[in-house]
Image (cartoon, rainbow, N blue to C red):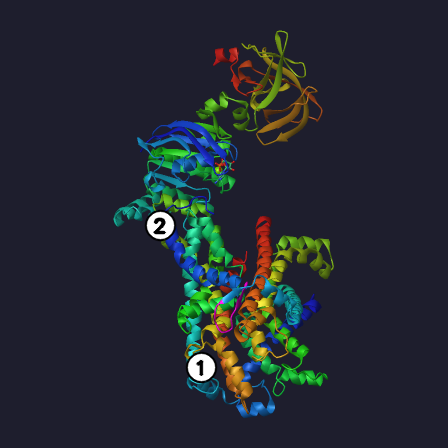
Amino acid sequence: MAGIQLNTLRKIYAGNVEAVKGISIDIKDGEFIVLVGPSGCGKSTLLRMVAGLETITDGELFIGDRLVNNVEPADRDIAMVFQNYALYPHMTVYNNLAYGLKNRSIPKDEIEKRVRKAAEILEIGDFLDRRPRQLSGGQRQRVAMGRAIVREPAAFLFDEPLSNLDAKLRVQMRMEIKKLQKELGTTSLYVTHDQLEAMTLADRLVVLSGGVVEQIGSPIDVYEKPASTFVATFIGSPAMNLLPLAKSGNEWKLDNGATVDVKLNTDLSDLILGVRPEDLVIEELSEKFDTGLHTALTVHVVEPVGAESYVHGTIGEGSVDVVVRAPGKLHFEPGQILKVTAKPEKLHTFDTKSGKRIELEGALETA
Amino acid sequence: MKRVQFSHPLMPYMLLLPQLAIVGVFFLWPAAEAIRASFYLEDPFGFGSTFVGLDNFKDVVSASEYSRTAWFTLIFSAAVTFFSLSIALLLAVKADNVIKGASTYRTLLMWVYAIAPPVAGLVGVMLFDQHIGPLNDLAHALGWNMQIGVNYFDTAFAMTVIAVWKQIPINFIFFLSGLQSVPKSVQEAAAVDCRSSSRRFWTVTFPLLAPTSFFLLIINITYALFDTFGIIDLVLKGEPGNNPVTLVYKVFLDGFRGNDLGGSSAQSVILMILVFALTVVQFRMIERRVHYS
Amino acid sequence: MKRSQFWDHTILVLGALFMLVPVVYALMTSSHDAVSIYKEGLQLSPGGHFVDTYKQVLTEAGGFTKSVTGLTMLWNSLVLGLGFAFGKIIISMLAAYAIVYFRFPLGTFFFWIIFSTLLLPLEVRILPSYEIVQGLGMANTYSGLIIPLIASATGTFYFRQFFKSVPDELVEAARIDGAGPLKFFIDILVPLSKTMIAAIFIIMFVFGWNQYLWPTLITTDESLFTLVRGMKQILQVWIGAQIPDTNQAMALAVLAMLPPVLIVVIFQSWFVKGLVESEK
Ligand SMILES: Nc1ncnc2c1ncn2[C@@H]1O[C@H](COP(=O)(O)OP(=O)(O)O)[C@@H](O)[C@H]1O
Ligand SMILES: [Mg+2]
C-alpha cells in the first residue's frame, strides 16, 4: 500500500497537444480519488501517465516513496481496470486472473489461492473455466476487477470501468467497488465523466477541465462550494442556474430588475449569481424568505420526474433560462408567472470574467 | 498504430529482417534492374550494354504491334471486367434473395475460385477444340466456324470466356458479402418506401454496394492485365503467331523469346506506371471507406 | 413472391451449371479411354477407365512428361503451396508485429519499403527477377521457386490490418500484467490471430499451389514441375500426338484443381471471411 504523489505533471502529445497542463495531487494511502470532467479534459491521459502507459512530459510521479517516471508499467505495482475490460479473449477467466501472477513467477499454489480468493469476493467462482465471451457485461466487469485484485497492488487505477454497463448494473457495481475498496484499503484513482458516479464513490473529487484542476475536495465541499462556474454547472443535475447580476447604486439587481439582497465585499460592478435548482423555492408552495433572492418566473414547461418536478422557465421577461426543482407533482400552465425565492446562504457568486468563486459575506457567517 | 508501443533496441529489426531481406533481394533489386535496363540497349551476345536514354520507350511505343497489343489489352480487360462483374452481381443478388438453399448456391458458385488460370485454360482449350470440343460443336450448330488459335477474333473470344468463367467466383463472393452487410433496417425502410423491387435495388442497394463494386473494378482490371497470363499462354499453346496477346504476355514474349531485354524492360516500366496508378486509386478508396464506416 | 423465387432459382441453377459443367467434362472425360474420346469428343458421362487413367498418370513417367510422374508433380505442388503459405505467414506476421506494435527509428521507412511491393506484381519485373534468382544459383530449387514469391507484402498487409483491429487495451493490460514483447506475441497475439491465420493460410495455399508464370521460368528441370506448371507441357505434347491422351491430360487437370478446391470448399466460411475481411 502506498500513497501517490503527482507533482505538476504535464503531457504534451505529438502534434503539440497539451492534454495535461501541470497537475498536482497528493493522494493519501488508502484514499479513493475520483478524476471527473467532461470528455477530452485529460482524465485518461493523467491516469495513463500514472499507469506508465504514457510517458510523462514533465513533472514527477511518486508511488509510495519511489519516483516512477521511468519505471515500466509492470514494475509500478499498480493494477488497472479498463473501460472495455481488456480481458484476454482466448483465455479462461482463471487464466485471465492468473496471467499477471504467472509473469511474476509467483508459485502455482499461491496463484491458485489468490485467484480463488478474488473469485470468491467477486462471486465469479462458477465462471473460472469460461471464456470472456461466454460472460455477461457485468460478469466481465467483475473479472476485470478480479484481475486487479489478485495482484494485490499498491494502487488500483480505473478508467471509466462502468461506462459499458446498463444503468441499473452501473449503480450496483458502483456500490460494490466502493465497498471493496474500503475493505481492501487499496489506494484508488478512478476516472469518470459521470458526476453522480464521482460524487458517490470519491473520498475526494478532482474536477478537471481542459487539462487543469478546477477544484479538489470532498464531494460535499465541491457541491456546496464550487470553486468556479465550471464546477458549479458540471457537478449536480440539473445544473446550477447562473444569472447575471449587476450593481445599480448600492443594490445588486438581476437583468429583470429584481433586487437581490446579498452582502458582498467587492469592487466589481457585475457578477454571476448561482443558485441550485433545489434551492429555488416557489413562494406559492412554501414560505417566503426575508432576504436573499425574490423574483418572478415565467413558466415554459414542467417536467415531472416522479417524486419531484423540474419547472423550466425564464426570469421575468428576461432571457435567462432557469430550472426549479420542487417536490411533488406540479401543474403549471406555460406562460404562468410564479414567484420564486432563495435563502441568502444558498446563493453563490462568481467573477464574470474568470468564473472564479467570490465568497458572500452572509454565506460566510452562516457557514 | 497502437497508442502504446513497445520500445526495444533490437527486436523490431530482427522481426523485420526476414521480410526486408526478401523484399530487398527479390523485389527492390529486380524492380530497380528493370528500370535500369529500360534505359539500356543490351548487346545480344552479352557483350555489355549502352545507355540509350528513352530510345527503348520510343521504339516500344512507336511499334504498331505494341499499339495493337495495347488496344487488345484494353478491350479484353474491359470485356472480362464487365462480364464477370455483371454476371457475378446478378448471381449474388439472386443468392441473397433466395431463402432455400442459399448456402448450397454459395458453395456451387464460388469453388471455381480455387482453380488455377492455366488449368482453366487447359480445360477451356479442350472444350473449344475443333475435333473433340463440345463448345466448338455448339458454335458449328449455330453456323459459326470457330477456329481457336487460327482466327484472331475466335481466339480472343475463347480467352475472354475462360477468363470470365474463372473470375466470376471472387466477384460473387465479394458482392454477396456486400449485399449481406446491407443493414436489415435499411432494406426494411426501403421496402416501406418503394414497392418495385428492381427500383429498390438500383436506388438503395446498389449505391450501398458502390464501394465494393469499385474495389472489385480495380481487382478485375488487375486480374485481366496480369493473372490471365496462364489462360492466354494455354489458349495460344505457346504459339502466339498472329493471335491476340496482352501487354504482360508481350513483356514475357519479347524478354524471353525475343531476347529484347531493353524493349521488354521498357514495357515493364510502362506497366509499372499503370499498376502504380491503379494501386494508388485503390488505396485512396480503401482509406475513404475506412472513414465512412 | 413464389414466381420471383422460381426465377431466382432458375438463374442460380444456370449459373451453378455454367461453373460446374466444364469441370464435369474434365472429370468424366478422364474416365474414358483416349481412342473413344478421339472419336466421340469430350464426355459428360462416366466411363470405365477411371482407375486406369489415374493410376497411370500418378505412377508412370513418360507420356506427357519424360521423367516425372503425376505423383511427383503433386508432391511439388504441395511443397510449393505449403512452403509458400507457411513462409508467408511466419514472415509477414513477424513483420506486421514489428510495424504495428513497436516504435523505432526508421519504422515508417521500412513500412513503406515493404508496402511498395504491393505496387508492382511479379509479372512486371519478371525478367530481372529471373536473372537475379538464376544468378544466385537458385534456379531449379525449391527455395528459388518459393522465396521470391514471398516478396509481395500481401500477407503483411492483412496481418497489419488485423493487428490494428486488436483493441489497444489488450497490449496495455498485458504490459501491466508484466508481459514483454515476446511474451505478448506468443501468449496473446498469436492465439488471438488463430482464425486469421487459418484464413490467410487457405488463401495463400491456394495462391501458391496455383502459381504458373514463376514456376514456368524458374523450373526447367522436370523433377521440380508442379501440376500447374505442367499444364502447358501437357498441352504441347497433347497437340503433337496422333491420338492424344486426352483422358490423361484431363486427369492431370483434375488433380491440379482438386486439393485447392477441396480446401476452399471445406473451409469455406474461414476462407470467405479471410478474403472479405482482409480487403477492408
Ligand atoms: N495519443 C494521443 N495523441 C494526441 N492527442 C491525444 C492522444 N490521446 C488523447 N489525446 C488528446 O488529449 C486530450 C485529452 O484526452 P483524454 O485524456 O483521453 O481525455 P478524457 O479521458 O478526459 O476524455 C484530448 O484532446 C485528446 O484528443
Ligand atoms: Mg477517457
Q: Position of residue A330 (x, y in %)?
A: 64, 27
Asked if the residue under mark 2 is in contact with the one under mark 1, i.e. CB atoms within 8 Å, the reply is no
SS at circle 2: loop
The residue shown at (70%, 59%) is B202
Tell me the crowding category of disc 1: few under 14, some 14 to 19, or many 20 or more residues within 10 angstroms, Cα based: many
Q: Give, as a three-letter code, the residue at label 2.
A: Leu
Tell me the number on the disc at residue C44: none
How would you rate the neighbour count of disc 2 (Cα within 10 Å): few for under 14, some for 14-19, many for 20 or more?
few
Q: Quadrant of residue B137?
A: bottom right
For the residues labelled 1 and 2, the Cα–Cα distance comes to 47 Å
Q: Residue furthest top?
A: A250
**What range of the chain is rendered magenta?**
B39-48
Along the viewing direction, whichever of C167 and A282 lies nearer the viewer: C167
* Residue B260 drawn at (x, y percent): 55, 71
Q: Is residue A3 magenta?
A: no
Residue B46: in magenta span: yes
Residue A108 position in % (x across, y down): 27, 50
Q: Is residue A216 visible?
A: yes
Name the disc covering residue B10, or none: 2
Left or right: residue B148 versus residue C141 is right
